[in-house]
Image: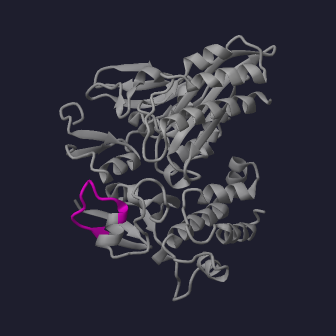
Amino acid sequence: MRISLRVNGEETVVDDVKARNTLLDVLRDKLNLKGAKKGCEGEGCGACTVIVDSRPVYSCMYPAIAASGRDVLTVEGLEMGGELDRVQKEFVNRWAFQCGYCTPGFIMALEALVREADSNPSKLREVYGGKVRGIVEDALIGHICRCTGYEPIVETALLLLSEKGLD
Amino acid sequence: MLLSNQDFIPIAGGSAIYIFSAKGLLQDVRGFVSLNSIPLNGIHGSDAYVELGATVTHQELLESRLQLPGVLREALLTIPKEVRSVGTVGGQLCTCFPNFDLNVALLALDAEVMVTGSDHVRSEGIEKFFKGVLEPDLRRGEIVTGIRFPKKRDLLSGYSKAALTAHGFSLISVGVALKVSGGFFEDVRVAVGGTLNTSPVRLKGVEGALRGRAVTHQTISEAAELALRDGALNVSTDFKTSSEYKRHLASVLIRRTILRVVGL
């Protein structure tokens, strides 16, 4: 089956997609985008996270066919003119990664959160009763990092949200 | 297509399907029929009922304007946002999985499942719908179109979960929904999910030991102990936990959740 979708802003056509293929299969094996990682395949490690139509999703359990016509953003699409974006820079500044395997997933989760804070901050406040740490923990709960101990990542998230007026 | 061919299965978000697929459980399935183009994504609340369309995602439910019962809201927040964005109310229901948090919460809320076939519409209590793991009470060609649960005034409810990671599949989870009147328990529902050999279950022994009794530490502790009895839960020892530990967890979580919702 042939599907067309937008990947990192570019209209993309992918041929020979099988019903059993996941979005992660398409990104890694057909489009050679190796940022999203295969980790647990369904238990919830978060390493495969990408953004589909502004929501974070686990690409390892997202049917490739369901991505047809949608807007997919991966870690490769963040850089602009050779420069890292705000979230990536802050990850570097705070040393919010060590081995790096989980990092694209964490970054995409925070990208989604930052976009949510931009587009609908009042909904975030309403859902979490105004507790910003709660917002951050909920955004990151589906990700596992075995190196950092999470605190630098949480601090990065808190800083990014405070820049959006959420603190 | 669904009516004439059993090798096709309906999907909504598709997340659960891909877990099964990765584990090699879908060898004889020839194709999927997506339900996402059917308008089944409404969320409605009346005075008497809350009605959720089958393809409402977990995240849409969490962000809806409805005042969600505690047990439902708390269950939603134990699920990763990445799953909530995709996974649907009806999809997780049809797996009948005991680990899926919303199943346990909906069982505690006395939900009713709405089913449509090619020439009929019916509704069924959630307990009966859960025939077994991966075994919804659906006949060929039938799909779940939605779920509804009664809106009860002064309902006290909550959800607790024990898992190996913050958001992981539950070892044991507990959803309770009850009312208290004049210091006595009324209308108690205690639902348990997790890594069971069955779909989520209600512990009617525990419920019976609470109903009509005074709301005290002692009543609650004694009732929660009944979860330890043989036969209360059908659990096995697996690579994560022993069956004894799961029974123990159930008892502890039942006690703690009830104490929390009644404010003791």
Q: Is residue B140 above or below residue A26?
A: above
Whether residue A124 can be seen here:
yes
Our reading of the magenta stretch's main secondary structure is: loop
**Residue at the farthest top position:** B212
Task: Judge left or right: residue B264 versus residue B239.
Answer: right
Query: Quick one: B202 or B181, which is closer to the camera?
Result: B202
Identify the residue shown where x is 24% and y is 58%.
Answer: A18
Q: Quadrant of the N terminus of chain A?
A: bottom left
Q: Is residue B260 above or below residue A115?
A: above
Identify the residue shown where x is 42% and y is 69%.
Answer: A37
Q: Is residue A56 magenta?
A: no
Query: Quick one: A131 or B183, which is closer to the camera?
Result: B183
Q: Is residue A105 above or below residue B213?
A: below
x and y percent of residue A92 in the render? 62, 82
Q: Is residue A20 magenta?
A: yes
Task: Judge left or right: residue B138 versus residue A43.
Answer: left
Q: Quadrant of the C terminus of chain A?
A: bottom right
- Start and end of the magenta stretch? A13-24
x and y percent of residue A62 in the render? 39, 55
Whether residue B49 can be seen here:
no
x and y percent of residue A2 in the render? 24, 62
